Image (cartoon, rainbow, N blue to C red):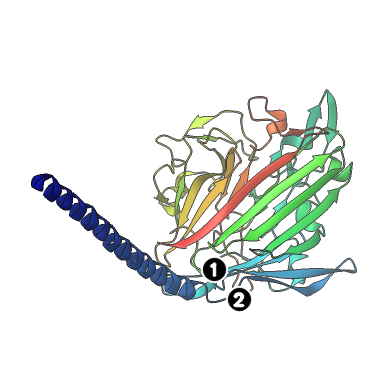
Amino acid sequence: MFSINQNMNNSIKKVLNFYKSINCMKYLFYSLFSIIVLVCGCKGTKDTNQSSSITKSVYGKVNDQEVYLFTLTNNKGNQVKITNYGGIVTSWTFPNKTGKKENIVIGFDSITQYLQQPPYFGALIGRYGNRIANGKFKIDSIEYILATNNGKNHLHGGNIGYDKVIWDAKVVNDTTPTLVLNYLSKDGEEGYPGNLSIQVTYTLTNDDELEIEYNATTDKPTIVNLTQHNYYNLTGDVSNTILNHSLMIDADNYTPVDSTLIPTGEIKSVLNTPFDFKQIQKIGSRIDAVTGGYDHNWVLNKKDTSLTMVATLWDEVSGRKMEVFTTEPGLQFYSGNFMDGKFINYDGKPLKYRTGLCLETQHFPNAPNQANFASTLLKPGEKYHSKTKYKLSIQ
Ligand code: GLA
C-alpha cells in the first residue's frame, strides 16, 4: 500500500516537473521570438525609410499633344522615370557599393532629344521587336509588306514603331508604383494586319526590380513580338564603355546571322565560341572575335513560359549587379556597336561606341519567315502575354 502511494506521489511530481519545464520552454520561446521581431523591425525601419510613390509632371509636347514624365520611387528611394512618349525609361537610379546613387540607363532630360530619332534608347518596341527579312511575311498564304527601315529589312516595328507613339497612361500605386500604358495599333500601321490593342505595365518593386508586363489582343491574325530597349551602363558613368561588365547568359545555343543581321536559320552551339556566356565572362574579353560585335539572339535554355532567371550582368567596380528574368525564349544581347557619340547623355557626356548595352527579351528575329523558330502569330480570341523583370542588387 505504502509503495503504491509513494509511486503515485513520484508520478505526480514527475508530471508537475514536466509541466514546469514546458512553461520554462514557453517563456524561452516567447522571449526569443520577441527579440527576433525587434531586430527585424529595426532592420525594416532602416531599409524602408520612405514610402513608395508615383508622380506625374508635364514633359513636353509631341505633335501638339502633351506628354508626361512619371517618377516611380520605391521605399528605398530608388527611382525609375518613364515618359508615355514611346514608353521610354529615361533614367533608373541605384546606389553603387559605397551608396552613391547614379543613373544606370542611358537617357535624356528633355523630350526634344527623344524626337531626334535616337536608336531606341529606353523605349518600348513593337509590333515586331528585331528584324524581319526584306520586310515581308505571310499569314495563310497572304503576303504582308512592312516598312523597311534597316537597309532592305524591317527593324523594331518600322518607321514609326511603338517607341515613337504616345501611349495612354494610367497611374496605380496600391502597394508598388505602377504605370499602365495602353496603345491601339491600327490595322495597316507600318504594314501589319489587324487592330492590336496593347497594354504594357511597368512596376518598380521595393526589391529594385523593374517589371515589364505585356498583354495584347488582335481582331485579325497578326504577328507580335514586344520588347523593351534600355541601354545599361552599370558603372553609372557613360565615360566608361561596357567592355568591363561581366555577363552570364543561360544559353547553350544562339542564332548566327548573315551580313544584314538576319538569322541564317541555324541553331548553333556556343561551345568554344565567343558566344559562350554560360559561365560569367567579361564582355570585352572576346568581343573582337565577333564581326561587328555582339548583336545576336541567344536561344535560352529554359523550356517553358515560366518567369525564369536567364542572364546576369555585373560591374565589379561599382558592385552593381542586374539579373534578367523572362517568360520569353530568346535574348538579344546588343553591345552598342552602332553608338557613335552623336547623342549626348542627360549629364552632357557623348554616348560613344559601346557605352551602353541592351538585353532584349524576345521571340527570335525573323521568326515569321523561319519555320523552325517558335511562332509569333496571334489570332483573334487569343491573348498575347509576356513578362520580363530586371533586378538590381549589389555584389
Ligand atoms: C537592336 C538591334 C541592333 C540595333 C539596335 C539599335 O538591338 O539588334 O542591331 O539596330 O537595336 O541601334
In the displayed structure, 37 sits above or below 161; it is below
Cβ–Cβ below 8 Å for labels 2 and 1? yes
Q: Which secondary structure lies at badge 1?
A: loop
Task: Give the quadrant of residue 220.
Answer: top right
Identified at 78% across, 69% down, the residue is 68
Q: Is residue 18 visible?
A: yes
Q: How many marks?
A: 2
Quadrant of the frame with the N terminus: top left
| Residue linked to disc 2 | 347
| Residue linked to disc 1 | 238
Identified at 16% across, 52% down, the residue is 9
Q: Position of residue 349 (x, y in %)?
A: 59, 73
Quadrant of the frame with the C terminus: bottom left
Q: Is mark 2 within 8 Å of ligand 1?
A: no
Identified at 43% across, 72% down, the residue is 43
Question: Which residue occupies the foreground of this view, 77 or 321?
Answer: 77
Task: Give the quadrant of residue 58.
Answer: bottom right
Task: Give the quadrant of residue 222.
Answer: top right
In the displayed structure, 31 sits above or below 331; it is below
Which of the labelled discs sits on residue 210, or is there none? Answer: none
Q: Is residue 130 visible?
A: no
Spatial CA span between label 2 and label 1: 9 Å
Question: Which residue occupies the foreground of this view, 87 or 338?
Answer: 87
Q: Position of residue 64 (x, y in %)?
A: 90, 69
Question: Which residue occupies the foreground of this view, 314 or 345?
Answer: 314
